[in-house]
Amino acid sequence: MKHTSLHALSALLLVSMVALHAAERVDVIANGGFEQGAPSPLVWKANPESVGAALSRDIAVKHSGEASGRIVTTNTSQRAWPAWEQKVTGVKEGQRYEASVWLRVAQAQPASMAYLSLDYRGADGKRVSHTMSRALYGNGDWMKVSAKVNIPSNTVTMICRLILHGPGMAWFDDASLVRVDGWEPEPRLKAGLVRLHPTGVVCKESFGGFGAEMDPWLWNELHRSKGVTDRDTELIAARVREMRLSLARIFVNKMCFNPSQDHRTFTWDSDGMRSLEHTLRLCQSNQIEAILCPVAFGAKPNHLWDGPAAPGPDEAVQAWSAVVEHLIKRKGFTCIRWWQVCNEPDGGWTQRTGYDFDRFVRIQELMLAEFKARRLPVQIIGSGDSESLQWFIDSVRRTSPWVGAYGGSRYAKDLDVEEVRERNVAYLAAMRAYDPEWSKKKYIVTEFGVRAPATTDKHNAYMRTFDCGLAMASLCLDQVALGVDAASIWCLHRIYYSADNLMDYGLWEFKDENWKPRPLWFSYSLFTRFMTRGSRLSQVEVTAGEDLVKAMLAQGPEGRFLFVLNLSYGDVDLAAETGLPKGQWVRYTYDERVKQAAADRPLFEPGSATAYSGELRDRLPRRSLVVYQLR
Ligand SMILES: [Ca+2]
C-alpha cells in the first residue's frame, strides 16, 4: 500500500512540475488550407522561379475545406522549381520545426516531383542549406509528406516551399509548419510509472513473421574470390537458425539460368544457380518462406543485369515460370511461396524496359496462369513499389484478381519512423478501398529500414549504431500494430553487389570484419525469434507513455511474449497487467550495453526468472527494447 501511494504522490508532483516545461506547438504558416483569399490565396506567394508555371487557388480540387493551391507547369525545357512559398522570420539556430503538407499530382511525367522544402537563409539573404520532404514522383492521389528539422547555425529566415518540379499539375493543401518550443532532443517520460493494459484487441490473428533479404550470391565465384569459405557457410547457417527467420526475400538474376538471354535455353548448373540453391537450402531446412524477386525483369539491352533482348511479356513469363518449376519440382524447394515481378517497378523500371503499367499488370495475369498450369503453389505479391502510392493504388485496382498479397519497400527517410506509419496507413486504406477481396489478401512489407541523412547504400555508418537497432524496433512495433502481415528487412548482412560494390546495409559485417554483429542484429533478432510466423498479436494500451513507450503481446508456438519499447532517455518503472495466471517471466533486453557486446556474445541470453502474481512490475532501462517471456 505504502509503495502504491508513494508512486501516486511522485506522479502528481511530476505532473505539476512538467506543466511548466511542456513543449508548445505554434503553427507559423498562415492560410495553410488555402481557404482565405479569392481569387488568389492570402499570404502565399509564387516563387520568383515559377517561370512557365501557373499558380492559382483551386476550388474544384481540395484535401479539406473549400480550396487548395494549384501549380500547373508546362515548361519542359527550363530547369525550374515553381512553388508556393511563405517566409518565416526570427528563426534561430537549434529551434525545432515540423512541416507537413498534403499533395496530389496529375498529368505529370514520371520524373516530375512534388514535395515540400525548407530553405534556410542567412542575414545576407543567401541560402545556408535546405531540407526536402519525401517527394511524390509522377502522378499520385492525396498523400501527406513531412519534414522535421532543427534549424542550422547562421540562419535568420526560413522559406517554406510547396514545389512541383517538372511538367504536370499539383495541388497542395493543409500545409503546416509547427515550431515546437521546449522540444527536447533527449525526451524523458513525465510520469513516474507507466501502466500497460492488454485491451484484447487482436492486431493479427496469425502473423506471417519477420524476415530478411538473403542475397543468393554469397557462395558464387565473386565471393569465393573475396575469401568466403565453407567455414563461413557454417557461421551464416548457425545465425540464420538462431534467428528463426520466418521469411526471406531473394533476388534472382536471369543470367544465372539463361545466360544467352533468349528465354528458351536454360542452364540449371551454373555458378549463380549453385549459389542460389545454397541459399534456398538454408530456407528449406529452417522453414523459412521464400519470396523470389527477379532483378530487372525484362530490362532493355545493356542494363547492368540483363542481356541483349527485351522480351515480350509471354516469353519472359515462360522463362521465369520455368525456373520456378525447376527449383520447386526438380530441386524440392517447396519453401518458395511468393513471387514478385521485379524490385521496385515504380523506380524507373518502365523506362529501363520500355514496358508500361499495362504490361506490368499483364505479366501478373500471365504468371498466375502459368503457376496454375504447372501446378506450382506460388502466390504473387502485387505492386512492389518503392515510393509511389499511386503505383500501389493502380496495382490494387488492376491486379486484384491475380495477387495474393500487396507489398513494397517502406523506408523511414531521415530517421522519421512516424512518417512510415502514416504511409502504411495510406497503403492499407488503399488496399481496403480498392480490392473487394481485401480481407483475403495479405500486406507484406518486402523491404524496410531506417535511413539517416548523409548515408548511402555503400557508406552507412548509421547502420552500425545502437540507435539504428532502437529505431528499427520502433518501426517493427508500429507495423504490426497497424496489421501488417509480414515484413522483411534489407538485408541480412553486408555483401558485394558487384566486385567493387560492398553494400553497407545488413545485420552484420562482411568477412573482412569477421562477420561482426551490429547492434541491430541483437534488437531485430528479438522480433524474428519471438514474434514468429503463426503468432497471435494483440494490442497493449500504454498509460502515460507519451508515444515514448510502445508495447505488444505476441502468443506464438514458443510461448507468450510481451514486447516493450522504451524510447525515453530515462529509466521507466513499469506495471503491466498480463491477463495471465500467476507464474514467472524471464526478460531479454536490448539496451546500451550492447555497444560493448563482444562479437560472440550469446544472442539469446535471458535474464533470471522472476515470479509475478498477475501484475508484472519492472524497471525498463533507458532507451531499451525488453521482451518478457511469460510462463
Ligand atoms: Ca483546403
Image (spheres, grey):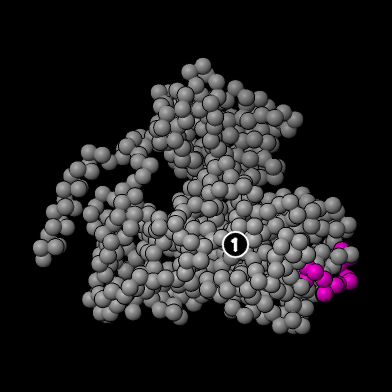
The answer to whether residue 281 is above or below residue 259 is below
Q: Is residue 612 left or right of residue 238?
A: left
Q: Residue furthest left?
A: 2
Q: Is residue 206 left or right of residue 219?
A: left
Q: Quadrant of the C terminus?
A: bottom left
Which of the 4 image quadrants contains residue 552? bottom left
Mark 1 is surrounded, within 10 Å at the Cα level, by few (under 14), some (14 to 19) or many (20 or more) other residues, namely some
Q: Residue furthest top?
A: 124
Most common SS among magenta residues = loop
Q: Quadrant of the N terminus?
A: bottom left
The answer to whether residue 215 is above or below residue 337 is above
Residue 271, magenta (yes or no)? yes
The boundaries of the magenta stretch are: 261-273
The total number of labels drawn is 1
Residue 629, magenta (yes or no)? no
Determine if residue 23 is in view: yes
The answer to whether residue 406 is above or below residue 282 is above
Residue under the image location 42 percent in, 26 percent down? 91
Residue under the image location 37 percent in, 74 percent down? 629
Q: Amino acid at mark 1?
A: Trp
Q: Nearer the viewer, residue 380 or 504?
A: 504
Q: Which residue is mark 1?
A: 515
